[in-house]
Image (spheres, grey):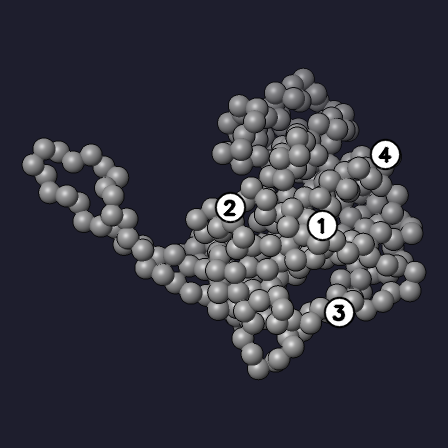
Amino acid sequence: MGVLQNKIDFVALVSVERANCNGDPLNGNRPRTDYEGFGEISDVCVKRKIRNRMQDLNHQIFVQSDDLCDDGCGSLSERASNTMKGIKEREEYSKLACETWLDVRTFGQVFAFKDTKGLSVGIRGPVSIHQAVSVSPVEVESMQITKSVSGEKREKGENRASDTMGSKHFIRFGLYKIKGSINVQLAEKTGFTEEDAETVKECLRTLFVNDASSARPDGSMEVVKLYWWKHNCKEGQYSSAKVHRSVQVKLKDETAIPTSVEDYEITLTPLEGLTPEIIDGV
């Protein structure tokens, strides 16, 4: 497949049930919410999950999680140095980085490390993702937990250490909308292909596969629907904002507190000449 020729917009509807979809480290790791009580998932969090899925699909990525590192590199600087050693021209550096790592030609990357000896390379990626926001305000619940197993070895005759108290936070239920777009002009610069776009689509469809943790048990987070619009031109037939707005999600009963996806009515406003592919998620 060749370089992407048609603009793409997408919307993913994600349900969260009794899980912490994106904890805020500056707020005791409570699920992120705005001042009006709407839940939030940062774009960085969504991109991290997409990168993990890219790895699962056997693609090389640059920004790897420590626990999923597959090349033995202990830092981004080391990973870049091992691949880019000796390259001093920005264009050559950028070209090789995009050819080597799928996430670089997808999201872009800034390469500015000590061992580059003053060479700084900034790459703008064609895939942009918005911060996800819940359709309705969410309820955050907290649960007190104890760690009853001592993490330290006791000396002979020493009394058993007391239990450690803590808290666990989660969303009772929330339906979130993830919005994004793929820009053709930037795709041409990074070499992002039609095949790469299909990979991003598959990553979004299976966003929470292999993502389970104590904060996000298997089955607590689900991609309900993925809407994928492929325009018939580079610039797009409609603005991304208008395309994203065409997916309308409203409570069937405005006075009820939602507990499942079934409590919502999901409608799609038709756009003349632009019909989305509607995909069931995992």
Give the residue pinned by disc 4: 1
Where's residue 145, x and y in %?
31, 55
Taking the image as shown, residue 177 lies to the left or right of residue 74, namely right
- Nearer-N-terminus badge (3/2): 2
- Nearer-N-terminus badge (2/1): 1
Residue at point 36%, 61% (across, down): 143
Secondary structure beneath disc 2? loop
* Residue 110 visible from this viewpoint: no
Figure quadrant of the N terminus: top right
Q: Nearer the viewer, residue 42 or 249?
A: 249
Residue at point 60%, 64% (across, down): 175
Give the residue pinned by disc 2: 212
Above or below — where is 86 with respect to 94? above
- Nearer-N-terminus badge (1/3): 1
Point out the frontmost of discs 2 and 1: 2
Give the residue pinned by disc 3: 267
* Residue 170 visible from this viewpoint: yes
Give the residue pinned by disc 1: 128
The three-letter code of the residue at mark 2 reads Ala
- Nearer-N-terminus badge (2/4): 4
Where's residue 152, x and y in %?
23, 37
The three-letter code of the residue at mark 3 reads Thr
Secondary structure beneath disc 1? strand
Which of the 4 quarters of the picture holds residue 269? Answer: bottom right
- Distance between the Cα atoms at labels 4 and 3? 33 Å
Where's residue 58, x and y in %?
66, 30
